[in-house]
Amino acid sequence: MLTKILGVLDAVEAVFLILVFFGIIDPIWLLRSAAYLLLKGWIFFMLGRDFASVIDMAIGFSFLLFAFIPIPTVLMVLFVIWLLQKAAFSFL
C-alpha cells in the first residue's frame, strides 16, 4: 500500500514540474516537491543504499534550484520521465 501512495506522490511531483515549466503554477511549489523528494530519497537511501534514492535526492536538489531559475527543457523531460516511470512501476 505504501508503495502505491509513494507512486502517486511521484506522479504528482512530475505534474507539478510540468505545470511550473509551462508557467501554470508558481515555481515556489517546487520547494514543497523538493522537500518531499529529498526526505523520501534520504530515508530510502539510509534504509537500503538504493540507487533510485540517490536519483530522487538529485532531482530534489534540482527542484530547489528550479524554484528560482528557469528549468532547462531537457532536464524537465528527463525528470518527468523518471518520476512517471517510478510511479508506474509502483503499481506493478
Image (tube, rainbow, N blue to C red):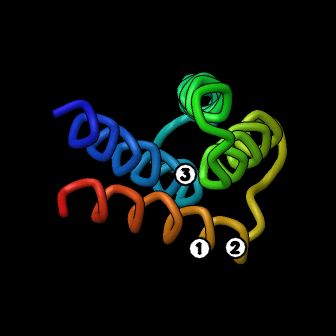
Residue 10 coordinates in the image, percent (x, y): 40, 46
Q: Dot 2, how many residues are within 10 Å of its Cα: few (below 14), some (14-19), or many (20+)? A: few
Disc sitting over residue 77 in the figure: 1
Label 2 sits on a secondary structure element that is helix
Q: Dot 1, how many residues are within 10 Å of its Cα: few (below 14), some (14-19), or many (20+)? A: some
Q: Tell which tag, 2 or 1, sits nearer the viewer.
A: 1
Front residue (pair 15, 44): 44
Q: Tell which tag, 3 or 1, sits nearer the viewer.
A: 1
Label 1 sits on a secondary structure element that is helix
Q: Identify the residue shown where x is 39% and y is 63%.
A: 84
Q: Identify the residue shown where x is 19% and y is 57%.
A: 91
Question: Could you tell me how many numbered marks the image carries?
Answer: 3
Q: Is residue 71 left or right of residue 65?
A: left
Front residue (pair 90, 65): 90
Disc sitting over residue 12 in the figure: none
Q: Name the residue under label 2.
A: 73
Residue type at mark 1 is Val
Q: In this view, does 43 lie above or below 58?
A: above
Measure the C-alpha gap from mark 2 to mark 1.
6 Å
Residue 64 coordinates in the image, percent (x, y): 76, 33
Q: In this view, does 64 lie above or below 69?
A: above
Label 3 sits on a secondary structure element that is loop
Q: In this view, does 18 lie above or below 28?
A: below
Q: Tell which tag, 3 or 2, sits nearer the viewer.
A: 2
Q: In this view, does 70 lie to the left or right of 1?
A: right
Disc sitting over residue 23 in the figure: 3
Q: If you read the primary sequence from the N terminus, does the residue marked by circle 3 or circle 1 appear first?
A: 3
Mark 3–mark 1 contact, CB under 8 Å?
A: no
Q: Residue 8's quadrant in the figure?
A: top left
